[in-house]
Image: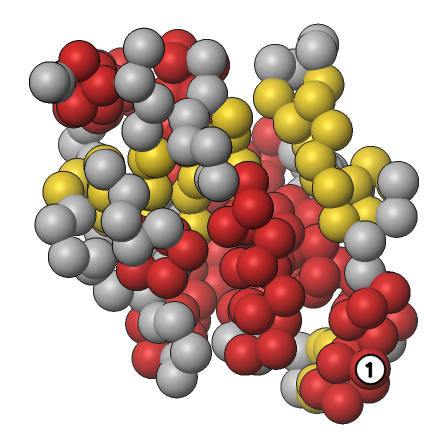
Amino acid sequence: MKKITIAIDGHSSTGKSTLAKQLAKALNYIYVDTGAMYRAVTYFAMQQGFVGEDFLDKEALLNSLSLINLSFKFNENLGFAEMYLDNNNIESAIRSIQVSNLVSKIASISEVRSKLVQQQKQYGVDKGVVMDGRDIGTVVFPNAELKIFMTASAEIRAQRRYLELQQKNENVSFEEVLKNVTERDAIDSSRADSPLIIAENAIVIDNSYLTKEEQFNKIFNLATDLINAD
């Protein structure tokens, strides 16, 4: 059966990763969460004292880039791959609001993007991959057969993220989450290197009022139509 590359871009907290995992499982494709890779570098920078809310030691981080060893390892119990840094599982740690508040700052550094994009491109050499992030359809896989751009209102995205964090017992207010969502939108869309934009030929999905099932069915049908096309 023909294999394709599926690129899913969009704003934060639109459910890109959840959708990408579902698609990869249904199609028996490889799933790559590029957001987790940027979060992992952010987590590393935080652990080393290179970044905080009001400071960034860019030079120190760049001097340490070669020391950052990222990998995905499949968790059979969860049904998806988790993020590892130097063979340590950091999947839970990188989902904190503290990492969320700083990840756009790290992701705007060209040298970081170059390192991670190079690794991301390797995952898709043989196609049969679903990858989500901010620049998948524009930079990583500009020739992807299916490009999706996901969006929703900032308030709805913040509410979804707030409920997720509450379930993890994170001590955070809705106002703080909304501030994080809007600030990440601004940084991601205005950065000089690979800004968040709608890729050419991308299909825009506003899931503000779509159920996860409705969204999945819509995009799964788009994918299977392309796979089965002559």
Q: How is the image coloured?
A: secondary structure
From the viewer's perspective, tell me whether residue 202 is left or right of residue 74. Answer: left
Horizontal side of residue 225 vs 211, given as left or right? left
Q: Name the residue located 75 percent from the left edge and 49 percent from the top edge.
A: 70
Report which residue position mark 1 lands on: 63
For residue 91, above or below residue 224: below
Q: Tell me, yes or no, if residue 174 can be seen here.
A: no
**Which of the two residues, 221 or 188, is positioned nearer the viewer here?**
221
Splitting the image into 4 quarters, where does residue 4 fall? top left
The amino acid type, in three-letter code, at marker 1 is: Asn
Say above or below: 114 vs 116. Answer: below
Task: Tell me the element at label 1.
Answer: helix
Q: Name the quarter where the N terminus is drawn.
A: top left
Expressed as whole percent of the image width and height from the top left, the position of residue 3 reads: 34, 23
Residue 130 lies, in percent from the top left, at: 42, 32
Q: Is residue 30 above or below residue 53?
A: above
Q: Is 61 on the left or on the right of 180, as rendered? A: right
Horizontal and vertical percent position of residue 177? 48, 56
Disc 1 crowd, CA 10 A, few/some/many (<14, 14-19, 20+): few
**Front one among 120 and 45:** 120
Name the residue rendered at 56%, 70% in the picture.
Answer: 114
Instruction: Give me the residue at 30% from left, 18% from top.
Output: 2
